Amino acid sequence: MKGNIKIVTIGGGSSYTPELIEGFIKRKDQLPIGEIWLVDIEEGKEKLDIVGNLAKRMIKKAGLDWKVHLTLDRREALKDADFVSTQFRVGLLDARIKDERIPLSHGVIGQETNGAGGMFKAFRTIPVILDIVEDMKELCPNAWLVNFTNPSGMVTEAVIRYGKWDKVVGLCNVPIMCRKIAAGSLQTEEEDLFFRFGGLNHFHWHRVWNKDGEEKTAEVIEKVYATEGGLKKAMQGLKSSGVQNIPNISFLAGQIRNLGIIPCMYHRYYYITDDMLKEELESYEKGETRAELVKKTEAELFELYKDPDLNVKPPQLEKRGGAFYSDAACELISSIYNDKKTYMVVSTRNNGAITDLPDDVVVEVSSIITAHGPVPISWGSFDASSRGLLQLMKDMELTTIKAAVTGDYDTALQAFTLNPLVPSGAIAQTILDELLVAHKKHLPQFKEKIEALEAK
């Protein structure tokens, strides 16, 4: 890359965009940005205009001459791009509401990236990301794809496995939150700790050491995960509670001690499923699922964004969840561009980092970010208490991705059957069928099956 760089954000009308712009401004001396293109679809035009104008005001306030383009023409934007970031939601928040409420109506976990809802987000998203990749092959064949679109691990896997595009990195803010929680519990700075992460997106574990080389994993478990209310207290102690999608319920202390490694917040769906479901059902009955609350928060944010005098990222954005993601995306881009060799946790090809999984699958793992992309840091092997569940979840992901690409109903049902959060048999089939019909507008690959279901 030479001269000014061109950055394209697909899903540019997202409420996250101000944080992305703030991250680029912070790195103005590291990234010679010439153009930023914010891309959206017709349904997102109003939000694109609002957030795009805020982005322009932020850049002007920073005294920068970057050109900001707002467009609904993805191909125009992608031409000669250096970096493409993705943060889009197929079907918008109304689709997420369906992903959560339909499974819950059958007494089954309804969540954005886990269980039936997470699989349907993959079904809707993967065909779109693969179309984007085809455009990139033609219009910006040397660009890096930085993906935050959920389910981030599966989307990244689809890009590599079916899109045949290796210059892709998946990002998530959960490892960032895990680092902050550990540092807070040990009353030290993140920079004074060394972390090693291994697993899948929204399904990783980690270990931690101090600067003297002493492992502090067990101490973090005791202070945060094996103390009643410890995790809740740790989250409240953070400046921004970036993982807002998950009910804050304590793990079972003995189980986490026995694991000997620190789970991520999303593991609660698998380790204490009944407790999580109970909490979700209470929210469902009140019409306050996470998606419904996010929709209200977003509406409030965009009212703030409309203010012509606003020229900074408003602090209310922290309530949206996903805090620190955009800053991570900017740091990732800077590290690739400048070959900074930054330590980050990303979704990338395994390449032997986790010996319990094939080399060619995508994992979420500690990596060094270089000019040629992430270089995974070895995790090694998991204990039997974690290994089987990890392998099952990876196979579930691969089966889900295959169903998303092929539109094969039986493959989709197979993915449902593999997922620990979806009951097998008739309930799985009922939820699958209802979600297919509910999302028919965004599932062209399942068109024939949906028509047959509607004809019943």
Image (tube, grey):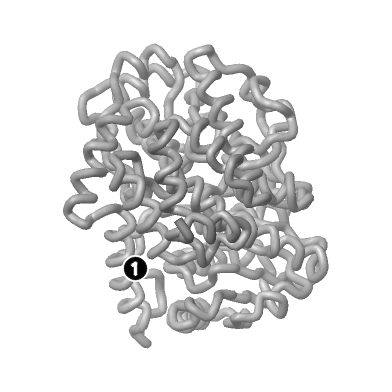
Q: Which residue is mark 1?
A: 298
Please state the horizontal and vertical placement of residue 342, each as a whole percent of the image. Answer: 63, 44
Residue at image coords 38%, 46%: 111
The secondary element bearing badge 1 is classed as: helix
Q: Residue at x 69, y 48 (%)?
A: 340
Q: Quadrant of the N terminus?
A: bottom right
In the image, 225 versus 238, the foreground residue is 225
Query: Is residue 317 shown above or below 393?
Result: below
The image shows residue 65 at horizontal and vertical percentages of 61, 82
Check the picture and name the quadrant holding the C terminus: bottom left
**Horizontal placement of 55 versus 230: left or right?**
right
Q: Is residue 210 left or right of residue 74?
A: left
361 relative position to 385: left or right: right
Is the residue 370 above or below the residue 68 in the image? above
**Does residue 197 appear in this view?**
no
Residue 439 location (% of width, % of height): 47, 60
Q: Position of residue 207 (x, y in %)?
A: 49, 24
Residue type beneath disc 1: Glu
For the question of whether residue 72 can be seen, the reply is yes
